[in-house]
Image (cartoon, rainbow, N blue to C red):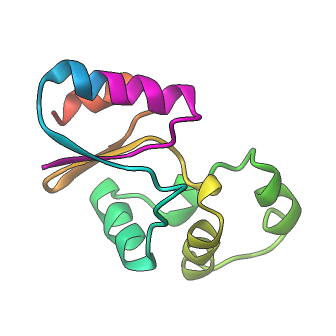
Amino acid sequence: MITIYHNPRCSKSREGFSILEESGKDFEVIKYMDEPISEAQLKKILSLLGIKPIDLVRKGEAIWKSEYKTKTLSDEAIIKAMVKHPKLIERPIVVNGKQAVIGRPPVNIKTII
């Protein structure tokens, strides 16, 4: 099953959603701003992406700049920050089985569907 972690307010996330719709494949939508991602889920996503937690952070977000940017944070602390403030999570993320991509640019999604 394909899953998209989606924020409908984000244009790139909406583009990614459209790519999945056009593919004709079944997929699950998780609106992670409404349905928070757990630490365990986020760790699994990071593992599938093969990246460090800091690489999934939207560093331009005001909450990052005001509360975290100047601190030295462990991977665990960064994960906790993303769980607490889901707006910090880069989007969209698409998971298909044991593969995952960040849909920036959205065309990246086509590589796993």
Percent position of residue 31, x then y: 44, 50
Q: Position of residue 83 (x, y in %)?
A: 56, 71
Left or right? Give the position of 68 relative to 80.
right
Q: What residue is rendered at 42% in x and 23% in y? A: 15
**In the image, what residue occupies the spot 12% across and 24% down?**
24
In the rendered image, which quarter is residue 98 located in? bottom left
Q: Residue 11: x, y in percent?
A: 55, 25
Q: In the image, is residue 24 above or below residue 86? A: above
Q: Residue at x 27, y 49 (%)?
A: 100
Q: In the shown orientation, is residue 1 left or right of residue 59? A: left
Which corner quadrant of the image does residue 86 belong to? bottom right
Q: What span is colored magenta in the figure?
A: 1-18
Residue 7 vs residue 44, the one in the foreground: 7
Q: Classify 38 as above or below 82.
A: below
Q: Is residue 71 magenta?
A: no
Residue 92 lies left or right of residue 49; in this view the side is right
Identified at 63% across, 53% down, the residue is 87
Q: Residue furthest top?
A: 22
- Residue 79's x, y, as percent? 55, 73
